[in-house]
Amino acid sequence: MDLYAEALYGYALAHLHDPSVAEDLVQETFLAALGGVARFRGGSSVRTWLVGILKHKIMDHLRRKYREGPRRDTAPDGREFEGFFDEHGAWKRKPTRWAADPHRLVQQQQFMETLFECLAGLSERAANAFIFREMEGMTTVELCKLLDISATNCWVILHRARMKLRHCLEVNWFGNTGKEGP
Amino acid sequence: MTHWMFDCREISRLVSMSMDERLTLYQRTGLRLHLLMCRCCTRHRRQLFFLRELMHGYSRLCDTRSEGVRLPPETRDRIREKLRQAAAGQ
């Protein structure tokens, strides 16, 4: 169990940002796995099998949460990105060059901490949307269902998440000299 | 700077949308022409795809490695106890 518990916990934490919920879902995953061990036929690794169960549990949890919670409207707001653009719609802070290799950067603990801090700065729905779209490759149709929002809202949320994340990383990582940056 | 018919603010929206959906011909043309002339938006677009690649990389990493995130010991004990009880009950 120890072999997989931490991998599952890390996976849950990346998707949920709430350690207590992550713990509960890891626990439920092990219990479900124990009950369904007869159905495990090999073919995939045990880890993949467990992550698959956990992923379903995470999605069920989010689906329930967003369906039960108040449906917040996130209509496009023209003024929302005022901080990024001037009155002519041009960049206020010009994007700098990111001279880094994403495959190497992802292995850098310090960078990942910055990334997760930036993700934590987003609304929970926006962070979930970004993670499921970019990490899991979930389609926007699936995403709309999961987050209980319209397609338009889905694009707005993803756009907002990408803008804010990119900006946050630019300021907190790539903009700092001395790190792997511009 | 305003290039062609979309400004950078609008282009940032189209770039994000193009990562999820197929744009209309009008949008695609406007986007392409703007990117040809605007280094800021070209960088911005590249960085959004950088983030996508990064998250894919992280997903693969989660599948193969687990260091970095430690399960709190008391949680591990709790899970172990629950599993023991569940196994005994079967």
Image (spheres, rainbow, N blue to C red):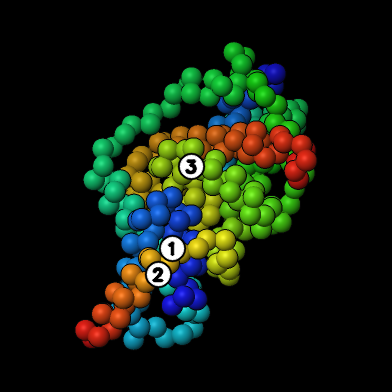
- Is residue A75 in view? yes
Q: Mark 1: which secondary structure?
A: loop
The CA distance from mark 3 to mark 2 is 25 Å
* Residue B32 visible in the current orientation: no
Q: Residue at 50% of width from left, 67% of height from top?
A: A7
Question: Mark 1 sits on what residue?
Answer: B72
The residues bearing labels 2 and 1 have C-alpha atoms spaced at a distance of 6 Å
- Residue picked out by circle 2: B76
Of A11 and A3, which appears nearest the observer?
A: A3
Q: Please give the residue where the numbered disc 3 appears in the rendered image.
A: A120
Name which residue type carries label 3. Answer: Ala
Query: Which residue sits furthest front?
Result: B74
Residue A118: x and y, percent?
A: 54, 40
Amino acid beneath label 2: Arg
Q: Mark number for residue A11?
A: none
Q: Chain of mark 2?
A: B
- Image quadrant holding the C terminus of chain A, namely top right
What amino acid is labelled 1 in the image? Pro
Classify mark 2: residues with Cα within 10 Å, few (<14), some (14-19) or many (20+).
some
Q: Are marks 1 and 3 on the same chain?
A: no
Query: What x and y, as percent, mark residue A73?
Result: 33, 32
Q: Are marks 2 and 1 on the same chain?
A: yes
